Image (tube, helix red, strand yellow):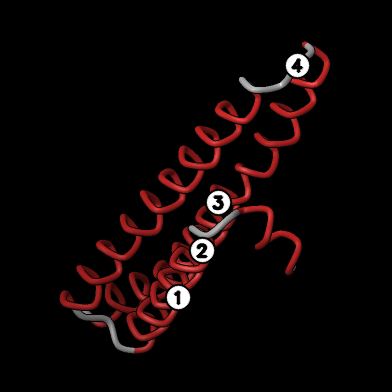
Amino acid sequence: MLQFMMEGGFTMIPLLLAGFCLTAVSVLYAARPSDRLRAVARNLGAMVLFGGLLGGAQAARTVFRVAATAESVDDRSSIVLAGLSESANNLVLAFFFLALAAAVLSVGAWREKRAL
């Protein structure tokens, strides 16, 4: 797990914190559904999604900048392949938290419908 976080770069830490906040709000919404918590979860979900996209784009930009300085074509292709696989870690972390939150939020939505 530490290797996964290290490969993703510095944007993994705020993404991890936002993902934990999203999970906590989702659990609160599942326990006690309310419009306010649904709005907070939606906004945190957007923040996690765009944070993952931003981290992936930032890492891809760095990969291409480093690959441009490589001397041979073989070095460039190996740098790009390795770098893009590492930059995808931001997206993987974001999608993990979004999937987890969606599952928990659906419990809250089910409970809210049942209460009506």
For label 1, the crowd category at 10 Å Cα-Cα, with few meaning under 14, some 14 to 19 and many 20 or more, is many
For label 3, the crowd category at 10 Å Cα-Cα, with few meaning under 14, some 14 to 19 and many 20 or more, is many
- The amino acid beneath tag 1 is Thr
Q: Quadrant of the N terminus?
A: bottom right
Q: Earlier in the sequence, mark 1 or mark 2?
A: 1
Above or below for 37 versus 103: below
How many numbered marks appear? Answer: 4
In x, y percent, where is residue 10?
52, 60
- The amino acid beneath tag 2 is Phe
- The amino acid beneath tag 3 is Asn
Q: On the image, numbered disc 3 is attached to which residue?
A: 90
Q: Earlier in the sequence, mark 2 or mark 4?
A: 4
| 2 or 3: mark nearer the eye | 3
For label 4, the crowd category at 10 Å Cα-Cα, with few meaning under 14, some 14 to 19 and many 20 or more, is few
Query: Which of the labelled discs sits on residue 43, or is there none?
Result: none
Q: CA distance from mark 1 to mark 2?
A: 7 Å
Above or below for 97 versus 115: above
Q: Residue at x 63, y 50 (%)?
A: 89
| 3 or 4: mark nearer the eye | 4
Q: CA distance from mark 2 to mark 4?
A: 39 Å
Circles 1 and 2: CB atoms closer than 8 Å: yes
Q: Looking at the rendering, which quadrant does residue 54 occupy?
A: top left
Q: Under tag 4, what secondary structure?
A: loop
Circles 3 and 1: CB atoms closer than 8 Å: no
| 3 or 1: mark nearer the eye | 3
Q: On the image, numbered disc 2 is attached to which residue?
A: 97
